Amino acid sequence: MRIILRIFLVPFLLWSLVSRAEDMIKIGVILSMTGGTAAFGEVTWTGMRIGRSIRPNVLGKEVELILVDDKSDKIESANAAQRLIQKEKVIGILGDVASSNSLAIAPIAEENHIPHISPASTNPIVTLNRKYVFRACFIDPFQGEVMAKFAYNDLGAKKAAVLMDIGQDYSVGLSNAFQKTFTKLGGKVISRVNYLSGDQDFTAQLTAIKETNPDVIAIPGYYTEIALIAKQARELGIKTTLISGDGAEAPELTEIGGKAVEGLYYTTHFDEKAISTPLGKKYVEIFRKKYNHAPDALGALGADAYLIMLDAIERAGSTDPEKIRDEIEKTKDFQGVTGVIFIDSNHNAVKNVVIRQVKGKESVYVSSVNP
Ligand code: PHE
C-alpha cells in the first residue's frame, strides 16, 4: 500500500514514504501541529484525512497532502507557504486555523496565484480584497453578533466584561464584533482588559473586572488562556457566566480548565446534532467509529476545506491553479460536512453559527443561528 500523506515536521524534516509524486495532485497543508495552538492543527489534520479517505482521487489521479507544521508561529506559516509553492509546486494550499497565521499565508498565495482555503480562520481580513484566498467558515462579525445576542437576549446580561488577546487578530476582531452588537442591543461593556497569548497570570485583569461586577465575561481568545482565565476567575470568587467564541473548542479547554469552565458557552461551526447533509452524516459515522467520541468542529471544517478544493478541481477539469481558483469562487450549494456551503463575493462561507455549552468533559449542543 502506498502512503500518500507526507508530513514535514520542523524544520521541514521529511517524513515521507512517497515515490510516485509526479502522478499525484499535490495540495499543501499548513497547520499548527506544535506550539501554543497545537490542538487546532491536530484535530484539523484528522478531519482533513477523513475528507481524503472519503474522496482520495480527482481527475483520475490520487491526491497527495503535504503537511507543514508552522509551530503556531506566523513567520513559520509564511515560510511554509513559500516552501510549498516554490519547492513542492503545490496547486493549492489548505490552512491555517488561527487567523494571524492565515493572514501570513494569504499574501504569499495571492502573489503566486495559488488558491488558498483556510478551513477555520474567521477574521474578515484574511480573504478581504484577495483574489486567491477563500475560507470554509463564517466570519467574526457574524460570530460576534451571535455571541452578543446570546449574552443579551438568552442570558439576560446587561453589563459585560471583555478580555481580549492583543496578540491575535482573531481575538481583537471578535472582541470588537461582540462589543458592537452588545452595545447596539442596549447592553454596556463596563470593562475591557487585554492579555497576550502565552500569558499565565490574569489576576490583575480579573481583579479589575471583579470590581465592576459584570453579568457576563466574554473571552474571545484561544483555549489555553480561556481555561487559565476561568480557573483564576473562580479562585478569585468570580462566579459570573463565561462566554467565548470558536477558539474555545479543543479538548484542552476542559483538561486545563476542569470545573472552572463548567457551564461556559461558546459559539462554533458544527455539532453532530445539527447535521443537514449526507456528507455530514457520513463524516460523523467514520469519525465515531474511529475515535469513539463526538466529532469537533475543526475536523469537520478541515474536511470541508479539502472537499471544496477537490470539487473545484473537478469542475475546472484541470490542475491549473487559475482555473481552480475560478471554480472555488463559484462554489454554491456545496453539500459539505458542516452544512450546505455557499461562497459569497468576499470569499467567505455563509453558514450557521452553533452555540454549545461545556458540561463535564464534553460540550453539549445549545442551538443554531442562521445568517
Ligand atoms: N476562528 C479562529 C481564528 O480565526 C480559529 C478556530 C476556528 C479555532 C474553529 C477553533 C475552532 O483564529
Image: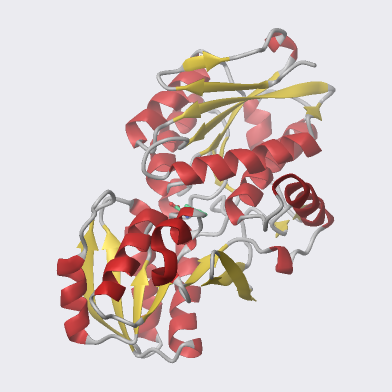
- Residue 332 or residue 290, whichever sits in front: 290
Coordinates of residue 281 in the picture (x, y in percent)? 81, 56
Q: Is residue 330 above or below residue 12?
A: below
Coordinates of residue 89 in the picture (x, y in percent)? 57, 16
Q: Can residue 328 be seen from the camera position used here?
A: no
Coordinates of residue 332 in the picture (x, y in percent)? 73, 53
On the picture, is 278 further left or further right than 48? right
> Which residue lies at the image location 46% right of the left edge and 29% below the top edge?
69
Q: Can residue 29 be seen from the camera position used here?
A: yes
> Which residue lies at the image location 43% right of the left edge and 29% below the top edge?
108
> Which residue lies at the image location 48% right of the left edge and 89% below the top edge?
153
Q: Is residue 303 above or below residue 180?
A: above
On the picture, is 344 further left or further right than 100? right
On the picture, is 95 further left or further right than 207? right
Q: Quadrant of the N terminus?
A: top right
Coordinates of residue 19 in the picture (x, y in percent)? 69, 7
Classify residue 26 by image quadrant. top right
Q: Is residue 140 above or below residue 92?
A: below
